Image (cartoon, rainbow, N blue to C red):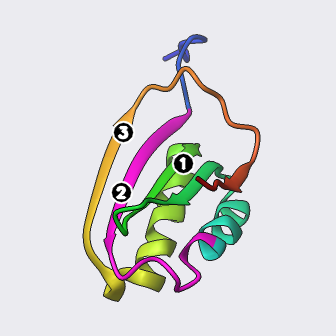
Amino acid sequence: MAKDKGMNLTKTVHVFYSGLVQGVGFRFSACQRARNFNVKGWVKNLNDGRVELMAQGSPRSVGGFLEALRDEFSQRFSDVNIEEFLSQEVFSEFQIRWY
């Protein structure tokens, strides 16, 4: 079966982490893990205490990245909300964003 040349092999997820996730090095660790998994996007603290994350890469890379964060920080999460979607935006790096 031939591959569809228009097939998008990029996965984009938008994640909200709730719990004790601010002030514990989560954003710094996310940035490091993203580089290890060749994931692009961003992470930032929200005023309500949650952390928001956008990750983009191959399905395998994004999955490994999210799993690595879960393995390191799951005891601090009270809730994780993940939404997968098709993104028009293409990220060139992974960065910590500030409000």
- Tell me the mark number nearer the camera, choosing from 1 and 2: 2
Q: Is residue 22 above or below residue 3?
A: below
Label 1 close to label 3 by CB (< 8 Å): no
**Which image quarter: residue 13?**
top left
Label 1 close to label 2 by CB (< 8 Å): no
Residue 90 position, x and y percent, is 65, 29
Residue 40 position, x and y percent, is 66, 47
Q: Residue at x 59, y 70 (%)?
A: 27
Q: Residue at x 41, y 45 (%)?
A: 14
Magenta stretch holds residue 14: yes
**Which image quarter: residue 56?**
top right
Q: Residue at x 39, y 53 (%)?
A: 15
Question: Helix, strand or loop at disc 2?
Answer: strand
Q: Amino acid at mark 1?
A: Ala
- Tell me the mark number nearer the camera, choosing from 3 and 2: 2
Bin the neighbour count of mark 1 within 10 Å (Cα to Cα): few under 14, some 14-19, many 20 and up. many
Q: Earlier in the sequence, mark 1 or mark 3?
A: 1
Question: Helix, strand or loop at disc 1?
Answer: strand
Q: Which residue is mark 1?
A: 55
- Depth order, front residue of 41/12: 41
Q: Which residue is mark 2?
A: 16
Question: Helix, strand or loop at disc 3?
Answer: strand
Q: Amino acid at mark 3?
A: Glu
Q: Amino acid at mark 2?
A: Phe
Q: What's the distance in space between the residues labelled 1 and 3, CA to CA?
A: 10 Å
Q: Is residue 45 above or below residue 68?
A: above
Q: What's the distance in space between the residues labelled 3 and 2, CA to CA?
A: 12 Å
Q: Earlier in the sequence, mark 1 or mark 2?
A: 2
Region of the chain picked out in magenta, as a range: 10-27
Magenta stretch holds residue 9: no
Q: Which residue is mark 3?
A: 84
